[in-house]
Image: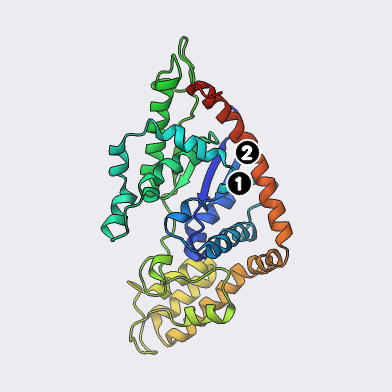
Amino acid sequence: MGVMRILSGVQSSGRLHIGNYYGAIRQFVQLQEQGEAYFFIANYHSLTTLRDPRQAETYTREAAMAYLSLGLDPKKAVLFRQSDVREVLELYWLLGTVVPVANLERATSYKDKLAKGISADFGLFAYPVLMAADILLYSPDFVPVGKDQIQHIEFARDWAVKFNLTYVPGYDPQDPDGKEKGHAPGLLKLPAARVQEDTATVPGVDGQKMSKSYGNTIDLFGDEKELKKRIMGIKTDSTPVEAPKPTENAPLYDLLKLMLPADRFAEADASWRAGGKGYGDYKKLLLAAFLDTFGPARQRYTELQNDPAELERILQDGAERARAEATRLLQRVRRAVGIP
């Protein structure tokens, strides 16, 4: 068996926050040690919600700097902008010619956004096809996703099967790799979803799940003055200083548990339950923990900000490596469908 290939992406539609790190990026950094890793900045996808060109460019650059600052090693993993590998757009179309409209109409993300009043444009409707093309273009063994993204991987598998049945003589969905005599391997490899069951759900400063759409985030690379303001503004109740503090529906407590080392959290937990300290003390403790945890990454981020040429060099190198892989597959796909 060859080296395992991993692929994932992050949408560059806003500044990254600690929920992005604990929910996804930390896992991605670990995965680069386990196989051949491809990570892309999904700046085509971001255009479904982001219509300011200056912001779009800024957020793409910030996402790349965040990945690199938080531990992604461009010598071990391939980091690139989605838009630098234009082959994905051709596969998007070729794959889309076999995609049933009914699949797109039942896409959970599409229905959820419609329910929230977001207008139903083509980009939103066809989003899953582009996501499938992103995946299938690089033939990964698995794609790390949250539970809410499993349907997208199922779509990618179903559409890959349909494409292979349409264009690969001798293809058998029961033997997709063509291991049995008389069966041909599929052109599009079927990816597996890897769901991280214990992914941390990070509370925002208001107690809801941390999300850019709620405006309740603690940004990873924000200004330190603003960072302090956000942390000191975390929602708490009116429990007096001397009383034990509640541990249920307490975002400050949950954030301390997430960010403090186990031994330091045990101390904080004991005093939290005993009473005698005010919430302000624990917010200062959380601020210190944040700076301890992300201080080196924030320093690296500043270095990359001050050296845009180095950042661009890394992204162009990643794009060249990604395009080499994408071109090989697309040449075979073009021949299969009858395009010279």
Q: Is residue 44 left or right of residue 320?
A: left
Q: Is residue 289 left or right of residue 113?
A: right
Instruction: Identify the residue position indicated by label 1 in the image.
Output: 84
Q: Residues within 10 Å of mark 2 (few under 14, many from 20)?
A: many
Q: Residues within 10 Å of mark 1 (few under 14, many from 20)?
A: some
Residue visible at 69% across and 57% down in the picture = 311
Q: Is residue 114 above or below residue 302?
A: above
The percent position of residue 114, horizontal first and vertical second, equals 28, 55
Circle 2: residue type? Arg
Callout 1 touching callout 2 (CB < 8 Å): yes
The percent position of residue 134, horizontal first and vertical second, equals 50, 41
The quarter of the image holding the C terminus is top right
Q: Is residue 210 visible?
A: no
Q: Which mark is residue 323?
A: 2
Circle 1: residue type? Asp
The percent position of residue 220, horizontal first and vertical second, equals 55, 68
Q: Which mark is residue 75?
A: none
The percent position of residue 167, horizontal first and vertical second, equals 44, 21
Q: Is residue 92 above or below residue 177?
A: below
Q: Is residue 324 visible?
A: yes
